[in-house]
Image: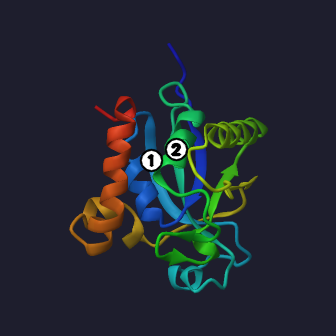
Amino acid sequence: MAQATAEIATLAGGCFWCLEAVYDQVKGVQSVESGYIGGQMAAPTYEQVCGGRTGHAEAVRVTFDPQVVTYRDLLNVFFVIHDPTTLNRQGNDSGTQYRSGIFYHSPEQKQIAQEVIAAVTQERLYPNPIVTAVVPASQWFEAESYHQEYFARNPSQGYCTYVVGPKVAKFRQRFAPLLKA
């Protein structure tokens, strides 16, 4: 009998609602949690992070089964559902809290992240250079409960309709083989 395994991927790519909504639909993903990482303050609030005073990024912590979906697969999705070429900005959201970042949990994750960035760069998927930071995972702070599963609970909210929904649709079209049944 195969032993169940789980790994964690921590990714920042602008608003965490967008990333959570996509990764919730990936087969092999066991859970997705919105939160904050990479800052200097203990237990930051959403208002503090959005104010740009804590140094944290809005991020998701993805718990996944690597026997079903690989870390590389998760990163390939990551580089399609956000713009990794805009420093501290995603669309109209600007500030360091919206930076693009991969927070690795092992030397293997760091290597895979660097390989994926090199491949995306070589493929010229974007006209501008990738600015995604690849840094060690630091202390994680779970976001407030009203941020968890935000898109699933609020699909008709304006931001969800105009920003999150199109990213989910793009993922579903481009990565159909990775969709949960």
Image point (51%, 32%), residue name: 65
Q: Residues within 10 Å of mark 2 (few under 14, many from 20)?
A: some
Q: Quadrant of residue 57?
A: bottom right
Q: Quadrant of residue 100?
A: bottom right
At label 2, the amino acid type is Thr
Where does residue 64 sit, x and y in percent of width and height? 51, 38
Q: Which mark is residue 63?
A: 2
Q: Which residue is mark 1?
A: 31
Mark 1 residue element? strand
Residue closest to the far right: 107
Report the side of 172 relative to 112 (left or right). left
- Count the numbered circles shown: 2
Q: Quadrant of residue 66?
A: top right
Would you place residue 28 above or below residue 155 in this image? above
In the rendered image, which quarter contains the C terminus?
top left
Where does residue 93 sit, x and y in percent of width and height? 50, 75
Image point (58%, 86%), residue name: 51
Where does residue 143 sit, x and y in percent of width and height? 50, 69
Residue closest to the far front: 127
Front residue of 134 and 60:
134
Front residue of 112 and 88:
88
Q: Residues within 10 Å of mark 1 (few under 14, many from 20)?
A: some
